[in-house]
Amino acid sequence: MGLNETPSADRVHIGFFGKRNAGKSSLVNRITGQELSVVSEIKGTTTDPVYKAMELLPMGPAMIIDTPGIDDEGSLGELRIRKTRQVLNKTDIAVIIIDAVTGTGVSDEELMKLFEEKNIPCLVVYNKADLLEEEKKPQKENEIYVSAVTGENIEALKEKIAALAPTEDSKLRIVGDVIHPSDFILLVVPIDKAAPKGRLILPQQQTIRDILESDATAIVVKEYELKETLENLGKKPSLVITDSQVFAKVSADTPRDIPLTSFSILFARYKGLLQEAVKGVAALEHLEEGDTILICEGCTHHRQCDDIGTVKLPRWIKNYTGKEFQFAFTSGGQFPEDLSPYKLIVHCGGCMLTEREVKYRQKCSVDQKVPITNYGILIAYMQGILKRSLEIFPAILEELQEE
């Protein structure tokens, strides 16, 4: 992702589903105006989900996902179908492509039932309308007949997709709803070996943007500059936001009358995980020797020698509890369907995941009764500053105090 592009997690994810040779890839190419997917008469040409970030008019920033056929066969086919189903967990709008000549099949009906169960808005698109002997009319509002070959009704289809997109007003803010114009917001950003060269990481970029859009002032410092900056600023900050890895030092250097939180906690709220993550962190006290903890990263960055997910968190957890645990790790789009081997899930802030995917993971943990928390909340809890870090969210803090 370039610095001037909308982050993939904030794009509307549009998944194209259907049987092999229904014309999914041809339709995706026609809609996007690009040769995004390989097209062939041979069934099963698309073997893995294909992702393409683009501006889709009249909607705006979107992530187009072309999936393998839902009716694929053999052992490899089963794997492809599993990957297709995983795409559902991040899909905001589902487009099911049906061959207009052969009509709806059992696998199509199963897909539509899945969309309904997951509460995913769905469009039913009958492709190859140019091959019909007589014109057919859609029976429902969410149906349309198109032709990827002739371009028939492609613009109407794009309009229907755009109409299903979530509106900006319905989206949560990262921090903009808890600050005011002219506020000073101090951001603490460590620059260490794990920091990417020449840029800030995505949550920091997005938080700064949200502060500026709120007509407030963002001041960025390293952890060792915080104390001096606070003394010389001339105006008390309305909020200090820190990287979770330096929570303890930042808490010690920030006067008690200045609100404090972390990027990770802000993103837990932004992605809809905060309430459950605050509840789940107490499970740390009840873990037994040898229990397995699952640590989930939403991205696939290169692991450093002192990586927070695979090195620091396991070390801090062992130091806090005095117990030895087993640790399992996932990254990117990986997330186990069966969570029974785990006694606690610790998730990253989820900046690279869509809100829908984070909520799916949360629902899996709740349904399977495995507590889930996130990096920032866990670190604040172990360092005794969780209540302080939640003070800007009174409703969440009140729930925590009642437990």
Image (cartoon, helix red, strand yellow):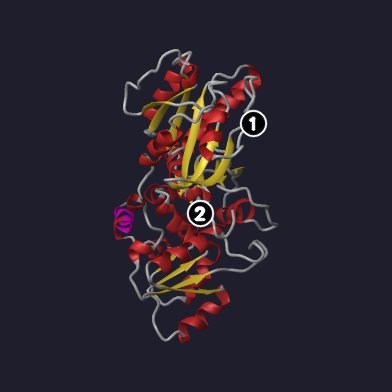
Badge 1 element: loop
Residue 94 point in image, percent of width and height:
44, 33
**Which is in the foreground here, disc 1 or disc 2?**
1
In the rendered structure, does residue 286 fall within the stretch colored magenta?
Answer: no
Residue that badge 2 annotates: 6
Residue that badge 1 annotates: 38
Q: Depth check: give the residue in front, 35 or 46.
A: 35
The 10 Å Cα crowd at callout 2, few under 14, some 14 to 19, many 20 or more, is some
Badge 2 element: loop
* CA separation in Å, label 1 and label 2: 26 Å
The stretch in magenta equals 396-402
Q: Amino acid at mark 1?
A: Val
Res 192 quadrant in image: bottom right
Q: Depth check: give the residue in front, 204 or 69.
A: 69
163 in relation to 375, above or below: above
Residue 255 point in image, percent of width and height:
41, 77
